[in-house]
Image (spheres, rainbow, N blue to C red):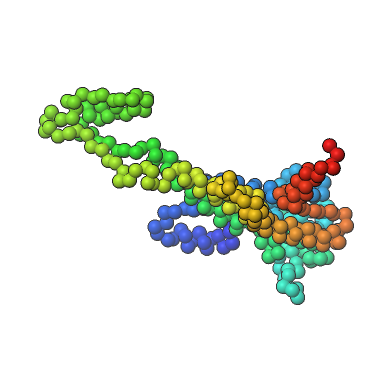
Amino acid sequence: MRYMPLNYDKLNAIEGTYFPSMVKSYNNKTFAFWERSFFQRAASVIMADLPEEWIGDVRDFFFYVLFRFGYMPVFNQAEYGYTFQPATLKGYDWYYQPTDAIVTNPALKESLELKIGTDCELLKLTPDYMGIWDIITYYAEKASTLDNAINMSLINNKFPFILGARNKVAGQALKKMLDKVNRGEPAIIYDMKLLNDQTDKVEPFMAWERKHSAKEDYLTTEQLADMQTLLNAFDAEVGIPTIPYQKKERMVASEAESRQIDSQSRATIWVDCLNSSAEKIKRLYPDITLSFELRYDPEKEDADVSSNDDPDRVI
């Protein structure tokens, strides 16, 4: 499922009528690849204990709705039982919270307008009723742009020189010499007669070289390192523990702990918000039990380490 931002038609009209419009940051295959990749990375952060009826494909849809829209109404429907759906919110209460959820689905004969707290209860990922697709698209756009730069770098690094020949004989000689170079021969010997054209005595070869050496350019190795930095930044944003590759051998314990706390900040808010709204669902529908926890919980990892270090433990 491709993400369509709010007011997509207006944004498309603005961008489509601006010339020159050379950079297509979003409408390309690499952006779709990274968007999908980052969504799956983010979805791995939270573990959910869901009702048995919501496993399999329903579970996959559950996580997509949760991360894409940021909320979903949970309600009891005559045909489908306890279920959830994407919805549109409307109305405000005293604390400016939505009062109603409108559910539209092709399987329904008509839309459902549910009163929050009476006919349904909302399960929220974030306190502001937003998903995390803004995070996903932010990093997907940068990864897509860098991905293209890496491809260009790989291609350009294959052709360090551009050679010109005044005639067909000289061109064939250059091709033969390049064949020998690519074959790995340590020395190339050519006939000195090729250096002077028989008609005007002008050298038949012309070479175009880079003004700077390859080492002075933005190397593919540096771009690949920047891609890893970008992936690490996304992981830290959504709650996947990571250590910067530049410091992995000399990072002190306090730095590692600070990095771990930084990576858990948003994910902790998400889990707290999910469990808080799950309690409200439980009060409205006692038969539904939902619970969520971090897949990478530093407190549990510390507890496991402490238990393993206990000298009195039974093995």
Q: Which image quarter is the C terminus in?
A: top right
Q: Tally the marks.
A: 0
In the figure, 174 relative to 305: above or below?
above
Q: Nearer the viewer, residue 232 or 82?
A: 232
Q: Residue furthest front?
A: 311
Whether residue 37 is visible: yes
In the figure, 184 relative to 138: above or below?
above
When asked about the image quadrant of residue 17, the answer is: bottom left
Q: Residue at x 86, y 61 (%)?
A: 283
Q: Residue at x 85, y 42 (%)?
A: 312
When asked about the image quadrant of residue 86, the answer is: bottom right
In the figure, 152 relative to 3: above or below?
above
Q: Residue furthest bottom?
A: 94
Q: Is residue 112 left or right of residue 177?
A: right
Q: Is residue 116 left or right of residue 167?
A: right
Q: Residue furthest right?
A: 286
Residue 168, percent from left and from top: 22, 29
Q: Residue furthest left?
A: 200
In the figure, 274 relative to 193: above or below?
below
Q: Residue at x 58, y 53 (%)?
A: 233
Q: Residue at x 29, y 41 (%)?
A: 209
Whether residue 111 is visible: no
When asked about the image quadrant of residue 249, the answer is: top right
Q: Is residue 77 left or right of residue 219?
A: right
Residue 50, percent from left and from top: 80, 50
Residue 146, percent from left and from top: 48, 49
Q: Nearer the viewer, residue 201 or 50?
A: 201
Residue 127, percent from left and from top: 70, 64
Q: Is residue 102 left or right of residue 142?
A: right
